[in-house]
Amino acid sequence: MSSHDNHQSLVHDILQQFDIDSDDVSKVTQRFLRQLQEGLDHPRPWQLPSYVYHVPDGSEKGTFLAVDLGGTNCRICLVDLLGNSTYNVTQTKQTVPEHLRINPRYQPLFSFIAKALREFLDRHKLRPENDCSAGARRIPLGFTFSFTCEQTSISKGTLIQWDKGWDIPEALGKDPCAMLQESIDEMELPVQVSALANDSVGTLLSRAYTSQEQGSTLAGVIIGTGTNAAYIEKVCNVQRLPRPERKRTHDSIVLNTEWGCFDDDLEVLPITSFDRALDASSINPRQQQLEKRVSGMYLGELMRLVILHCHEQGVFNMILGEESPCNRPYGLDSSFLSLLAKDKAAESLGVASAIERVLSAQGSTLRDARVLAQLADGIVRRSARLAGSALGAIIIQSGRLSDTQSEKGTVQVTSLQTHRHRSQRPKHFGRGCGLLSRIVGWLKRSIPSSTGPRNVEDKPLSRGSEQDIIDIGVDGSLIQLYPGFEAHMRSALRDIQEIGPDGERKVRMGLAKDGSGVGAALMANAAKLS
């Protein structure tokens, strides 16, 4: 066998390691479904109640501040909800320095946020001279804190763990809202932290507010630097809630799945030598296993490890210099994979030139570009199909597909306004449909699908009525910018027995623009109603 054939075989073997077939999808979905249900019954660091019982319908009005902390940035937003499913946002963004993201003490980080907030208030003349006098009006603020918290109310919670490369030990076990309010009060700002928001919960609320189809939104999904999802669950199913909360008149609650930590014991998630190397060198080994296979923070690192392996085996013609980002942990980010995907054929000299520029390489050829594009597509395809598998578990758990096939073909919407006077279903209704769902799924697969995947945007469904829509709000750089990411997610949905091609066509994914900021404002509004 020639060296060229050997190199092709090596690339093929790597792509096979990253392949997720229909059997893998089914195993991941069923495992995640069990984990979702376990988290409903017992306190776990997933399926975290948000204490949001009011799902927006687009009529909400008011002016709110929002702080969005996640990834490497801190955004300050002033959100005007106009009451007709529209809003105005004024915002600024600052990068959080690394020495604040990794620090033994929490005060430096929250002082940084409060200072940014003070500058924002001064710039927009929102801080009168007597802003701290007795009885002065305080502007309600929703705090989007994109790290795992166990909430005890809509405005209080306990930080369970850091991820996305953050590590501030002193903050663990403390309330993020209280830590931020402490710094706000030290600076005498007229602001009250009134809601603790997760980015995926915010994405769901923002999408529900803007979708103009009351009750159709089921979930919010983040696939960017990190990954997470939130969805609407029946209160009667959430046995982990304190009994007084379960006895409230609300039928539905928004849950934060924290799906990044799904299957940390690696029962079903695929694992390659590259996954092992990434996990071993990470700041949180043996944790956030789904996130390490799906989110943008880690896909660039997986690509870097694959490139180094192939380079050592002589697969590429290009030469990597000592200063190449491939020689630095996390030197590559997911934008490089998107660059390769935008010209999959990799037939232009411009692509080879871009590769040399990004990788600090010399002598890159079109063949190198094609191989790199294949490897990037394999890594991202796995990410998207795993995300689709997890989303499928949420759709099954929700019972929405069974609902759309029930009497008169209408959706039993989980929105508070439409369910307030309906009798609740038995606790395990969503779980008791397993056999029926499998039979329906078998019938679905016998019908060929003529409708291909759609882009992440609002397009009419090819079949069914607007009442059949299962609306998913999405946000994050990967799902927005990587060509074909949604298509791969949808291919996984079609592979799930209980969903199939017909069920996949009922799913609409739409961007939740400004999801974290607007969602935090909507949570601050919901806090008034709690």
Image (cartoon, rainbow, N blue to C red):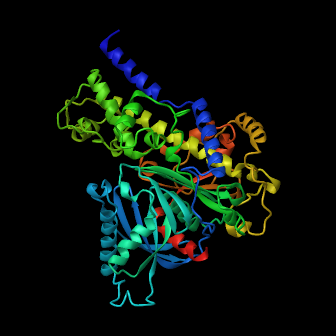
The residue sitting at the right extreme is 407
When the figure is inspected, residue 367 is found, relative to residue 3, above or below; the finding is: below
Residue 435 falls in which quadrant of the image?
Answer: top right
| Image location (x, y in percent) of residue 473 | 54, 57
Nearer-the-camera pick, 361 or 104:
104
x, y percent for residue 126: 37, 83
Residue 303 in view, yes or no? yes
The quarter of the image holding the N terminus is: top left
Q: Position of residue 249 (x, y in %)?
A: 72, 69
Residue furthest left in the image: 322
Please give left or right for residue 86 compared with residue 327 in the image: right
Residue at the limit of the structure toward the top, as seen here: 1
Q: Is residue 200 above or below residue 525?
A: above
At 56% from the left and 51% from the top, the residue drawn is 257
Tell me if 428 is positioned left or right of 326 in this view: right
The residue that appears at 57% across and 77% down in the rendered structure is 528
Q: Quadrant of residue 252?
A: bottom right
Residue drawn at x 39%, y 40% is 299
Image quadrant containing the C terminus: bottom right
